[in-house]
Every structure is written in structure tokens, then in C-alpha cells.
Image (tube, grey):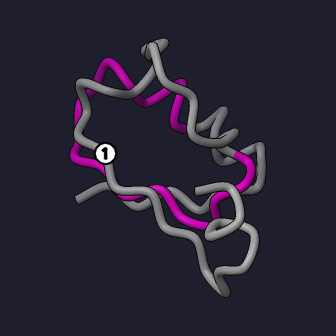
Amino acid sequence: MHQMIAQAHEKILVVDDSKIGKIAFAHIADLNKFDILITNYNKDNVQILKEIERLGVRVIVV
């Protein structure tokens, strides 16, 4: 997985709002390894999405 991420031209992470701000058992990659994060809107996640943008990740809320 790490090699695929490293070789990809553009790395897009798609997650629903229930995953934002959670710690998971499995770690695939740091958020700053992705170019774009796509998620749905949840008012409780606004601040953490701003923090993710500060990491250099473009955040798209749909």
C-alpha cells in the first residue's frame, strides 16, 4: 500500500464524516501523504477539517 501511495500522481482519500478525528486499529498512511480529502458535511468536524487543510491537504466537503 505504501508503495502504491508513493507512486501515485494524485492521492485522494474518501471517508465519511464518522471517520474524521478517530483513531483506527490499522494505519495506512499519514494524512499529509494525501493531496485531497473528500468527505460529507458534519458541523462537528469543521475545526478538524481546517487543521487537515493546514497540513496541505485540499478538503472537499460534499
Vertical position of residue 16 compared to residue 46: above or below: below
Rendering coords of residue 15 (x, y %): 31, 45
The quadrant of the image that shows the N terminus is bottom right
Rendering coords of residue 45 (x, y %): 38, 25
- Closest to the observer: 17 or 41? 17
Q: Element at badge 1?
A: loop
Residue range highlighted in magenta: 32-49
Looking at the image, residue 51 sits to the left or right of residue 14; the answer is right
Residue type at mark 1 is: Val
Vertical position of residue 7 compared to residue 33: above or below: below
Looking at the image, residue 46 sits to the left or right of residue 47; the answer is left
Rendering coords of residue 9 (x, y %): 67, 87
Vertical position of residue 39 compared to residue 44: above or below: below
Q: Residue at x 49, y 12 (%)?
A: 23
Check disc 1 and report the residue beneath it.
15
Q: Residue at x 45, y 13 (%)?
A: 25
Vertical position of residue 3 compared to residue 47: above or below: below
